[in-house]
Image (cartoon, rainbow, N blue to C red):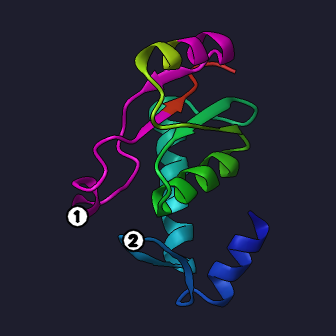
């Protein structure tokens, strides 16, 4: 986290991530991660020490979600986005995660690209 923050301050316009949809600069990556961390905290009760599972395809939104979870001090678990409903329920029972389906990418242009992304957010430590 500290290195990303330093890079965002020192080189906000340098490219940090490139995927098949977009190029994210360090400053924008940091801003998106901060916004996502606030949403996790305020919207889902995310906080330090909680388990946060992220099921997201390989793109910039996955990295943003990982950074946001880490920013909260949560324990981040990466989950295969192709898991079936039964597999997700078993994971939920085992890790005690509250599962909700949300978009893995922010922004109206990006949402259309990601119809199968899921994040799992905890409701209690």
**Residue at the location (52% across, 90% down)?**
13
Residue 113 picture location, percent across and down: 27, 56
Classed neighbour count for the residue bearing mark 2: other residues with Cα under 10 Å, few (<14), some (14–19), many (≥20):
few
Disc number lying in front (2 or 1): 2
- 58 left or right of 103 in image: right
Tell how many labels: 2
**Residue at the location (50% across, 56% down)?**
58
- 43 left or right of 71 in image: left
Q: Mark 1 points at which residue?
A: 109
Extent of the magenta region: 90-119
Quarter of the image with the C terminus is: top right
Give the distance between the C-alpha atoms of the residues marked 2 and 1, in whole angstroms: 14 Å
Mark 2 and mark 1 residues within 8 Å of each other at the beta carbon:
no
- Residue 116 among those drawn in magenta: yes
Above or below: residue 81 compared with residue 16: above
Residue 106 picture location, percent across and down: 35, 56
Q: Is mark 2 on a helix, strand or loop?
A: loop
Residue 110 picture location, percent across and down: 28, 61
Residue 14: name its quadrant.
Answer: bottom right
- 107 left or right of 38 in image: left
Above or below: residue 12 compared with residue 30: below
**Mark before the other along the chain sequence, 2 or 1:** 2
- Residue 113 among those drawn in magenta: yes
Q: Which mark is residue 20?
A: 2
Q: Nearer the viewer, residue 33 or 18?
A: 18
Quarter of the image with the N terminus is: bottom right
Above or below: residue 94 compared with residue 22: above
Residue 35 picture location, percent across and down: 48, 56
Classed neighbour count for the residue bearing mark 1: other residues with Cα under 10 Å, few (<14), some (14–19), many (≥20):
few
């Amino acid at each position: 986290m500290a290195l990303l923050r330093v890079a965002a301050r020192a080189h906000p316009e340098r490219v940090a991530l490139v995927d098949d949809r977009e190029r994210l600069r360090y400053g924008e990556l940091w801003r998106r991660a901060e916004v996502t961390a606030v949403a996790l905290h305020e919207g889902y009760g995310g906080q330090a020490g909680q388990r946060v599972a992220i099921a997201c395809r390989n793109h910039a939104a996955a990295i943003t979600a990982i950074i946001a979870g880490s920013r909260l001090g949560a324990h981040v678990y990466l989950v295969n986005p192709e898991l079936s409903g039964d597999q997700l329920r078993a994971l939920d029972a085992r890790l005690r995660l509250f599962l909700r389906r949300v978009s893995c990418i922010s922004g109206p242009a990006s949402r259309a690209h990601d119809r199968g992304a899921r994040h799992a957010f905890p409701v209690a430590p």
